[in-house]
Amino acid sequence: MAEELLPPAPAPTTEYCYRHPQTATAVHCTRCGRPICTECMIPAPVGFQCPQCVEDARRAFRRGSSTALGGGPIVTKVLLAAILAVFVIELAVGGAGSLLEGPNARQLVDLGALQPLLVAHGQFWRLFSAMFLHLGLMHIAFNAYALWLIGQMVEREFGHTEMAVIYLVSGFLASVASYVFGPVTSVGVGASGAIFGIFGAFIAYNFKRRHLELASANLRWAATLLLLNLFLALAFHGIDWRAHLGGLVAGLACGVIAEGWGTASQRRMVQVLGFASLIAIGVGLVLWRTDAIQALPIYQQIFG
């Protein structure tokens, strides 16, 4: 009888630490299952965990403590209250007819809308005030819903202070993008640039954890929303896509910075320097654009 030949046993697979790709290891994090080396192994009740999972667990514990004390999405609620309060002022200025379509352009400018010629004339505060104004009921309803939906998730994962900074910094840079790359005669309002910023931070947070099923699902949901907003930007010419894109890119950067790395003190230093750098970039772009606008004939004609 012919002897049956068995296939050779497969060669053992060498795995490498996901944080140190040059270091071979046979140990896996008991939380996420990724390979980790001895430098990354942190003792856990069962086995070892990686630094990222330990940090996620600490953050979840802090979130739980905050919620137990009645924390919740405090900053998100404050921001919603602020834009709703400003909308009431808009109605008072524009009258009952402004409920659906918002005040007219002149009234919006008086309330603080983003108008590049006025910004170039020294009214830089418009880069912030514009993100609290809206053009009618549908505009504010859509933005308020998006802010509540995404804002509470970002605030839960990053914390109250980080949420406030992400909103304001990305909102500022969204206005900068509109100011730098948009037409000088435009009038811009809306919180959507800042909301795209917190959306970008949401994407950055989940991308770092894309090996987890929930994060992967969140990324697919985010991709769908981005495609929808791309379609809307192409279909409706009144949408300030520059502010949306600027806010999204700024939010991605803010998300990476808010995560930080290293020890607690190192993480705080990364956050301070990172956010300061983003603001400095925005200020530099504003100064550059201001010089360019002030040299235009239309600026000279209006302001001398």
Image (cartoon, helix red, strand yellow):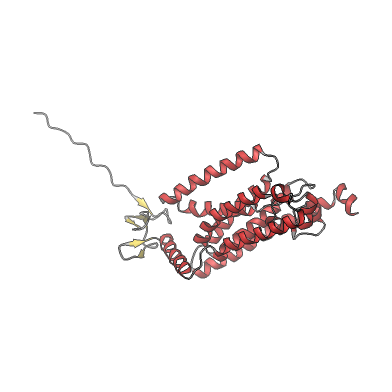
Give residue 11's quadrant in the image: top left
Q: Can residue 188 be seen at all in this image of the molecule?
A: no
Give residue 231's quadrant in the image: top right
Residue 236 at x, y percent in the picture:
67, 39
Is 71 drawn above or below residue 150 in the view shown?
Answer: below
The structure residue drawn at horizontal position 43% and vertical position 60%, both measured from the top left corner, is 52
The structure residue drawn at horizontal position 74% and vertical position 46%, both measured from the top left corner, is 182
Tag count: 0
Residue 40 at x, y percent in the picture:
39, 62
Lateral position of residue 161 relative to residue 34, left or right: right
Residue that lies at the very extreme toward the front in this rendered image: 96
Residue 57 at x, y percent in the picture:
41, 63
Residue that lies at the very extreme toward the left in this rendered image: 1
The structure residue drawn at horizontal position 88% and vertical position 54%, both measured from the top left corner, is 303
Quadrant of the snapshot with the N terminus? top left
Q: Nearer the viewer, residue 163 or 107?
A: 107
The structure residue drawn at horizontal position 74% and vertical position 60%, both measured from the top left corner, is 125
Lateral position of residue 89 relative to residue 267, left or right: right
Give residue 55's quadrant in the image: bottom left
Quadrant of the snapshot with the C terminus? bottom right
Residue 98 at x, y percent in the picture:
73, 50
Q: Which of 23 and 228 is in front in this view?
A: 228
Is 215 drawn above or below residue 56 in the view shown?
Answer: above
